[in-house]
Amino acid sequence: MSTPANRSSRGSTVVMAVYLIFLLLPIYWLVNMSLKTNFEINSGVTLWPQALTFEHYIKIFTDSSWYSGYVNSLTYVVLNTVISITLALPAAYAFSRYRFVGEKHLFFWLLSNRMAPPAVFALPFFNLYSAIGLFDTPWAVALAHCLFNVPLAVWILEGFMSGVPREIDETAAIDGYSFPRFFVRIFMPLIASGIGVAAFFCFMFSWVELLLARTLTATNAKPIAVTMTRTVSAAGMDWGLLAAAGVLTIIPGALVIWFVRNYIAKGFALGRV
Amino acid sequence: MEKPLNNRAWLLVAPVFLIVAFSAIVPIMTVVNYSVQDTFGNNQFFWNGLGWFQELLDPTTELGGRFFDALWRNLLFSAIILAIEVPLGILVALSMPREGWKVAATLVVMALPLLIPWNVVGTIWQVFARADIGLAGWAINALGIDYNYTGDSLAAWITIVVMDVWHWTSLVALLCYAGLKSIPDAYYQAARIDGASRWAVFTTIQLPKMKRVLLIAVLLRFMDSFMIYTEPFVLTGGGPGNATTFLSIDLVKLALGQFDLGKAAAMSLVYNLIVLALCWVFYTVMTNTGAERQQGETPA
């Protein structure tokens, strides 16, 4: 083996190690704080918990408002993912297979919604969903998140669908498959990984968004991330509880990543590499 | 092969069109409606014409002044994070392990910050950077540097930039990694036979192949940093003073804090138009590179 190659691979390992430590250190600190008592947190910096405690986690799991925060968040995230993918599938097929009047303008308009600042939409959404009686339900948040997730899903799925040769559609038509049957039985299995990637992205962006979710809910559908802001009490910040809640919001994301880890890189290129 | 023309494809697109129109056009019309009116409470509205727009685009007024301050602040922020995250992302992508369990493990750790709710990202950096309870804040002060991000504008900026680098560099790195993986091994073998240096391989093989994904990365990062809200809101609340009040934070302060609907609506529209213009540039550049690539690669 030549020495320059070895040197460069050692350099890579160092860069990677430093970067991963940089990523993990703040997360470690959060976990660390969630396992300390508030007395220990406030009395100075300790690198690991001196008196290990699970009191903050116990508090979260026994208090129903914390628990329902998780249920609410997951409800609207799942609803949104299902709606986005279901609607985006036929649209992405149309974009990948046909030319039609206004195709390019429509695609650009869809894309522009992915880029629109949620802050612009916060107040009008509040008015809109109050007017139609959906305010403070998971449906309001799920529909609001469609604003950016549907265009994203169309974009990703279109990329994957364009990778499937059009001859397959034609062969299926000759074999007597009706369009819906062809689409569900033959076409969807072919782009299964694309559907997975698109669902992952919808899940991700709906899960991490807070501004709209907070504006559109009051008490009944309050997401977990908003419940967290309650940890400021009269006695000052409850840092331990805040940290424990933070750790618990990282877990669903981590689980999802683990399941789709083989598609992550491909998905981040939006299926177009 | 040219796609066939078929206007019945609109039937397939209709559901998406309807739901996005419901979520986009109806609210935007509300905004347009507010932007030409003034209110003195009690739900009474008065016609104000283009008054708010004139005030907004004139930097000498109070409203125009704060809008342009926030706009420049936001552009500076976007420029800084792009200057850091893009080169760093490329470096990380080039340093990715080649095979084995290490690849999966690295990918999972790298994607982790992307899946954390944005206010929790703010919280993580709050407890990490605070001088009294945070590891970073404590360590920097222990080195003898006076650091307190809640009181000092420069420290607040640095903290927000580092937070954003922590949060989003992985996105750039993962995109570049996906681009790098699409380069066939034969290219590298040819380069080795020619005795090309590491730098030559990077500039003549890897960088051109990454151009497209890099473009997506730059534009996604630019757009998202241009509408950043939650993380700095949790970390600094826009302070100290107005030092870290970016466009979205300013807008929410105006709309939901002061309930100044007319001003906020005018600002929303201008803000949205800026984004739309940038988005158009994005789309044009992307479709053009896409077309070039197809022409270049498939002569048949």
Image (cartoon, rainbow, N blue to C red):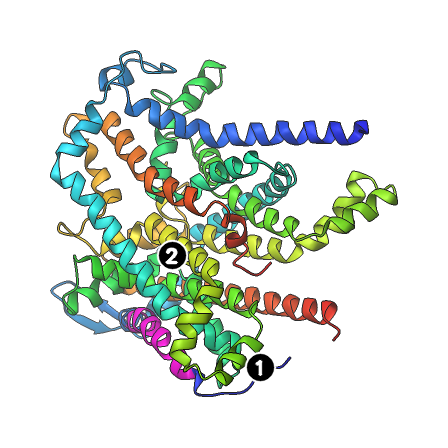
Residue at mark 1: B3
Tell me what residue is drawn at x 51 percent, y 68 percent: A161
Residue B234 in sight here: no
B87 relative position to A170: left or right: right
Residue A209 in sight here: yes
- Closest to the camera, between mark 1 and mark 2, is 1
Tell me what residue is drawn at x 47 percent, y 60 percent: A194
Q: Name the quadrant containing residue A4.
A: top right
Residue A127: percent from left, percent from top: 20, 65
Gap between marks 1 and 2 measured at Cα: 28 Å
Which residue, as the protein is rendered here, is positioned at the far front?
A175
Residue A155: percent from left, percent from top: 48, 65
Q: Tell me the element at label 2.
A: helix
What kind of secondary structure does the magenta stretch mostly adopt?
helix
Q: Name the quadrant containing residue B251.
A: bottom left
Residue at mark 2: A202
Q: Give, as a single range, the part of the protein colored magenta.
A: B10-29
